[in-house]
Amino acid sequence: MTFAADAMPDWVEVNGERHPLPEDLSRPATHFLREHLKLTGTKVGCGQGDCGSCTIVVDGEPRYACITPVARLRASRVLTVEGLAAGSPCGRRLQQSLLAHQAVQCGFCIPGMLMSACAAIDAGRVRDRADAEAALDGVLCRCTGYRKIVDAVLDVAIDAAPRPLTLPDDSIAVGRPLTRLDGEAKVTGTDHFGADGIPAESLHLRAVRCPHPRAGFAFGDLQAFVQAHPGVLRVFTHADVPGRNVHGVAPPYADQPVLPVDEARHHLEAVALIVGEADAVAALDLATFPITWTPMPALADVDIAARADSPLLHAHRPANLLIEGMVQRGDAEAALRDSALVVTGRFESSFVEHAYLEPEAGWARRTADGIEIHSPTQAPHPHREELARILGVAPEQVRVVPTAVGGGFGGKLDMTVQPLLAVAAWHMDRPVALVYTREESMATSTKRHPARIASSMAADAQGQLLAVTFEGDYNTGAYASWGTAVANRVPVHAGGPYRIPHYRARARARHTHVTSAGAFRGFGVPQTAMSQEQLIDELAVRGGWDPLEFRLRNALRPGDTLPTGQVLDDSVGLVACLEALRPHWQAARARGGDAGPRERRGVGLAAFFYGCGNTALPNPSTVRIGLRPDGTLVLHQGAVDAGQGANTVIPQIAADALGIPLARLHIVGADTHLTPDCGRTSASRQTFVTGRAAFLAGQALLGKLRHMAGADETAPVHFGEDGVEVAGVRLALAELPVDAQGYALKSEERFDPPTTLLDQDGQGRPYAAYAFGAQMAEVLVDLDTGRVRVRRVVAAHDVGRMVNPTLLQGQVEGAVAQGVGMALMERYEPGSGNNLHDYLIPTVRDVPEVETLFIEAPTALGPYGAKGIGEPALVPTAAAILNAIHHATGVRVREAPATPDAVLRALADAASRPFTSTGKV
C-alpha cells in the first residue's frame, strides 16, 4: 500500500480497530501501545531489541515493538497478544496448546513467543521442529527451557490432534498434571506484572546513580535544580527517609542503605531520587544534576579484600568478612594422610546474572493509615517488615501487593524498587511509579556468588569415601544480601550426597565494591557441586571404577548420618535415581569417542542432595481456609508464584485435604492484607512448607466441622452446592455468626519444619527434608574452537511425591537450560555489559533434549510426601557438563563458564600429555 506524500494516513489499525497516530512519531511502538492504548500485554524486557518480549505482528511479520518507532506503524495492521485469538487463524489454538503443554511458567516472555510463532505459522513457515525453533529464535525465555514451547508450536503448525487441557474436576488433584490455574491470563496478556498496572495519574521516579565502582559524593543546590525543570517536583536523598535508612534480608546483618549518605559502594548505586511528571523526568539530562563525585579505591577481588591494609566496606567487619560457615566431623586431615587415594583441586566460578525477563518495576501510594506498594516480589511479608522499619511505622500500616513476577530465581527476594517507591510515595499526594531499565536492573540487582574453592577428597582401595576438606571463598559484593545463607548452606553440602566419616568444610562470604551477590537458585550449592563432583569423578578414575558405580557405592541411604550429625529418615531416593540413570549412562558411554575428525563426544554425571528450606533457622508458613455460610470455601495462600507453579500446586494440596474438586475452591493470592505469611518463595520450600500448611488447614477445617456435628474424627464430610453434610447430617451454617471476613468457620494452620541451630562445629539438624538426584549430560566438544554443545540431559530426581508431574517436568527443563548457561556461557562482568546483547543466556538453539525421571521417596513431613524441585533441579547440571567435557577431551576445566577460550586453555595446558579419545575414561 503506497500513498502520496501529501496524503499520508494518520492512523494505525491495532487488533482490528483503527486509531489515530500520536503526535510524537519517534517514540517506540511499546510506548504507544502500552501508554496510549493501554495494551500492556506487549512487554518491555530490554528496550534494545535483544529479548523479544515486546514482539508484535505488523502486516503479518513479527517486529520488536521496543525499537520500532510509531512512524513505522503508519497505515499498518498491528496485532498484539490481546487481539491474537480473533486476529490470527492459529491464535487461540496456540494459546490453548501452550497451556496444555504446560509451556507457561512466569509468563513474561509468552506474549512475544505467541506473536513470533503465530506470524510464522500463519505464513506457512513452520513445517518441522527446526522451523518451530527458528520461529522462536528471536525471543528469550529464562524459565521454561523452551522445549515445551516448541512442542506446543509444532503441534499447532502441523495440525496435530490438540493436547487437551487438564482441568479441575471431581478427581483427586494431587498427582495429576492439572493445567496452571493462572495460565489463561498469561497467554492472553491480561496478567499484570510490575509495570502493567501503574495508575494513570502516577508521578514517576528516576534514580541518580553512581558512575564509579566506588565514590564519595556531595550534593549541590537541589532546590534550584527542581525549579529549573518544569514538571520535576522534588529530589529525595537519605535525609528524606522517615525511619531507618537501612535494610537487608537478615535484620542482624542489615547493611544496605535506602539511599547512601556520602559514599556509593558499587557502580550505579542509587544516591538520590527525582520525582515528577513522567515525560519531564524521562527528558532530564542527568549530567546537569548538582552532584560532585570523588572516585575512591575499589575492591573487586576477595583475596585483596581480605588483606589487613584493604579498606573496609563496613567498619564492624574486619577483613571484609561478612560471615564464615563451618561443618566438621572426625579428623579429615589425618584421614587424607592415611588414605590410599587422594585428589585435590582448585576451582573458580564467575558472577552469574539472574536475567529474568521482567526488569524491576512497581508503584506505591499513601493510604489513609499507611502505604500500599505493588511490585514483583518473592517475599511480600518480609518486605512489609523491612518497609515498616524504613518508614518508621507499624507493619500493619504497610500493604504489600505482589504483582505477577516475571522471573525471579532468588533475584526478587531482596528489595529493589520497593524502598525507593515507599520513601517517595510517603511524601507525595499522588501515586509514584518506578520502572528500571535493563541496564539498571542488571547493574544493581543481586548475582550468583563467584566461588573460589580449594578441596581434597580421599577414598580407600575398595572405593569407600573417607574424607573431604573444603575451603570456599564467595564474593558477596557491597552488601550482605543472602551471603549469610550461602556461607552457612555450602558447608553442609560440600561433600555431596555421600557417606563421609571425616569432614571439614568452611565457606566465607567477603565484601567487595560490586553489586551484591545474593540468592540465585541454589544458594552457592551449584557452583560448589561443579568443583566437588569433578573430584568425585577423579577419584573414580584413579581407582578404576565406573563413575556411576562409584557414586552408588558411596550414596547416602536411609539411616545414614550426614557430616552435621543428622541421621536421615526414609525419604532418601538417591540410589533409585542413580539406578534409573544406569541404562542411559551405559548407552551414552557406548556412544562415546570421535564424532568427527576434530570433534569428541563425552558423557558426564553429577549427583547431589539439597536441603529444602532455610538452613538451621525457623521457616514457617501459615495458610487460612474459610467457609462461608453458603458453603463456599476460600483458600488464602500467600505463597508467591514466580513461575514455579505455587498458584496451582498449593490449591491442589488444599483441595485434596478437604476432599473437594479443585474447581470448588475459591483462591485468594498473596497480599499482606489478605493472606497470612507463607514466607519467602525461596529455598525450594513452598511445596514442602506452605503445601504442608495448606494440608493441615484443610484437615483442621474438617475437624472443626466434625466437632460441630458431634461426629468422630473419621466421619465423612461432604461439601455440596447448597451446604455441608457431616456423616449425612446437614450443618446449619447460616445460623452461625460470621467474622470480619464473612466466614462462619475457618481454620488457620502454621507449619515450621523441625530444624535445630548448628553449633560451632556445624553439628545439628539444618533441614527437615532433603531432595536427592543425579543428572547425566552428553556433549560434543570441538577441539579446534573449544566450543561445547550439550546434546542431551537425563535428569533423575527424588521429589518425594509428584503433586503436578508436568509442572515438575517444566521446572527441570528450565533448570537444565540455566545450568547450560552457567556451565558454558554466562559470566557477568560488574560495570559493563548490562544488557542482554553482551550478556548471553541460552536461546532456543542452545538447549538440549531433556528426559526427566521422577523418583518418589515420600517424606512424612511433606504434603502427601512432597518435597521441592525448583533449586534442586539446577544443582547438578553444570557439574555433569564439566565432567562430560573431561570424558570427551581428557582435560579438566576448573573454571566456569567453560567458554571456548577456557576449553582451549585447558587443552593447551594438557598438550604435553597427549590424549586419544576412546569414549572411556
Image (spheres, helix red, strand yellow):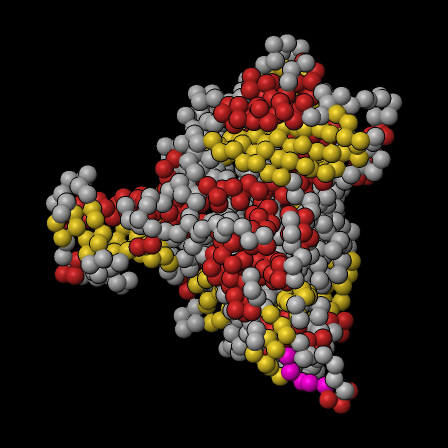
Q: Is residue 591 magenta?
A: no
Residue beneath the point at 59% across and 66% down: 42
Does residue 756 show up?
no
**Which residue lies most toward the right here?**
912
Range covered by the magenta-colored residues: 8-12
Q: Position of residue 24 (x, y in %)?
A: 69, 81
Residue occupying image coordinates x 17% and y 45%: 706
Q: Main secondary structure of the magenta part?
A: loop
Q: Is residue 9 magenta?
A: yes
The answer to whether 126 appears left or right of 380 in the picture is right
Q: Residue at x 53, y 26 (%)?
A: 580
Q: Is residue 920 visible?
A: yes
Above/below status of 477 relative to 341: below
Q: Specify whether 399 is left or right of 480.
A: left
* Nearer to the camera, 99 or 207: 99
| Residue 23, percent from left and from top | 67, 84
Residue 263 image point, x, y percent:
69, 58
In-front residue for pair 591/72: 591
Q: Residue at x 43, y 45 (%)?
A: 177
Label total for image? 0
Is residue 666 shown left or right of residue 501? left
As drawn, 503 above or below 830: above
Residue 369, x across and y down, in percent: 40, 70
**Which quadrant is the N terminus positioned in?**
bottom right
Where is the C terminus found, in terms of image quarters? top right
Q: Residue furthest bottom?
A: 6
